[in-house]
Image: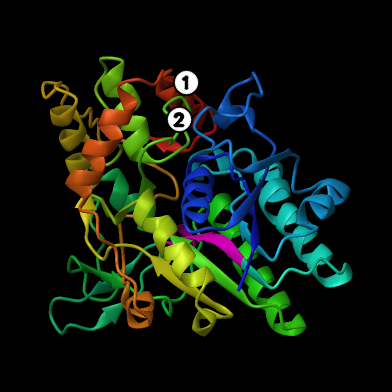
Amino acid sequence: MFKRILVTGGAGFIGSHMADLLLERGYQVRVFDNLEPQVHGDGGRVPDYLSKDVEFVRGDVRDRGALLAAMRGCDAIIHDAAMVGVGQSQYQVMRYADANVTGTANLLDLLVTEKTGIQRLLVASSMSLYGEGMYRRPSDGAAVFPQLRPDEQLAKRDFEMRDPLTGEVLQAAPTPEEKPLHCTSVYALTKKDQEEYSILVGRAHNIPVVACRYFNVYGPRQSLSNPYTGVAAIFSSRIKNGKAPLIYEDGCQSRDFINVRDLVEAKLFLLENPAANHAPYNLCTGRATSVADISRHLARLMKRPELEPEIPGSYRSGDIRHCIGDPAKVTALGWRARIAVEDGLRELVQWSESVEAVDEVDKAHRELVSFGLIKE
């Protein structure tokens, strides 16, 4: 079906695992990546983990000429290039909008105006565009789609989601793709724009497009020195440096943690499945894990169980309480996650033992405080 695949952002955490799997399945792989210093450090080196069998091209998705040259000769694109960081996006608005939205618009413009030969596009979307997940009202089981909790409630350290009509504490439920979207960060809004631009343009020009809504991805190669990446990597860096992980609210907020190997298997499944065209798919496990439990699992696996998470009760503007994915849509096509979070964290810890971790969490926290995004 396809011979050569272009992976934008392919030197990063998810993109490099994607490249590995594509190579394993017999595809030729071209990686296009700008080696963003926040992810790869200031040296600008291609990471050692990137397979020598990929064709690496250094470039930025906003550079029209460089991106077009990288697209030539490819049959499909997996578009992973993006700035990632919910908190940071709230005070680096232009940087995130430019990289994520303008970069994607440039790619789509080239697909439409140039004869690139691209037959299919997978775009990386995010669970963050849901805002809060779906909930159920205990008294009658009704589905509820709440927005952010009011500051007055959070200031009382009352963190659970409450029904706006009855005041009862709502029960988190699996969130389907049909849930109304309610972005609560600049990052989320850029991912929503990436997804909607891509599907709209794909339908208009008969280019098969699939949007992959990533839930909380973790695993080897996730930068341990980037304080704006996923919580599993951030906590690992703290523990590796002998510090307790810092958690906002009370630590009971829950997410759906999916191992990167499961994620890229799902993406390849969707790439090869024409029944998935022009639609978004949750890439998730359907299982909830609290943020505090992730911290404690990692501390135990890293043999530092005494490093209980630091939970001062402060909260971050725009944060959600619970969001667990409903995988029914992709499961109906024939794919499901296989790796339990305990097994996946063990793999992350084993990898982290040989990796440098510069703990920048305190610096990131101070930046959020300086912009008024942390409420004590």
Q: Secondary structure at mark 1?
A: helix
**Image location of residue 286, percent across then percent down:** 26, 66
Image vertical order of residue 63 relative to residue 142, above or below: above
Q: Secondary structure at mark 2?
A: loop
Q: Quadrant of the C terminus?
A: top left
Q: Which mark is residue 101?
A: none
Q: Nearer the viewer, residue 316 or 17?
A: 17
Residue bearing mark 2? 227
Query: Is residue 376 shown to the viewer in this render?
Result: no
Residue bearing mark 1? 363
Confirm whether the magenta stretch covers residue 97: no
Q: Are marks 1 and 2 in contact (CB under 8 Å)?
A: yes
**Residue in view at x 61 percent, y 45 percent:** 9
Q: Quadrant of the N terminus?
A: bottom right
Type of amino acid at the residue the image marks with label 1: Lys
**Image location of residue 344, percent across then percent down:** 25, 45
Res. 107 image quadrant: bottom right
Whole-number angstrom distance, CA of label 1 to CA of label 2: 9 Å
Image vertical order of residue 96 relative to residue 116, above or below: above
Image vertical order of residue 316 relative to residue 216, above or below: above
Callout 2: 10 Å neighbours few (<14), some, many (20+)? many
Type of amino acid at the residue the image marks with label 2: Pro
> Which-is-in-front pick, marks 1 and 2?
2
**Image location of residue 339, percent across then percent down:** 24, 54
303 with respect to 233 (left or right): left
Q: Nearer the viewer, residue 32 or 80?
A: 32
Query: Which segment did they paint magenta?
Result: 122-131
**Residue in view at x 50 percent, y 84 percent:** 275
**Residue in view at x 50 percent, y 74 percent:** 280
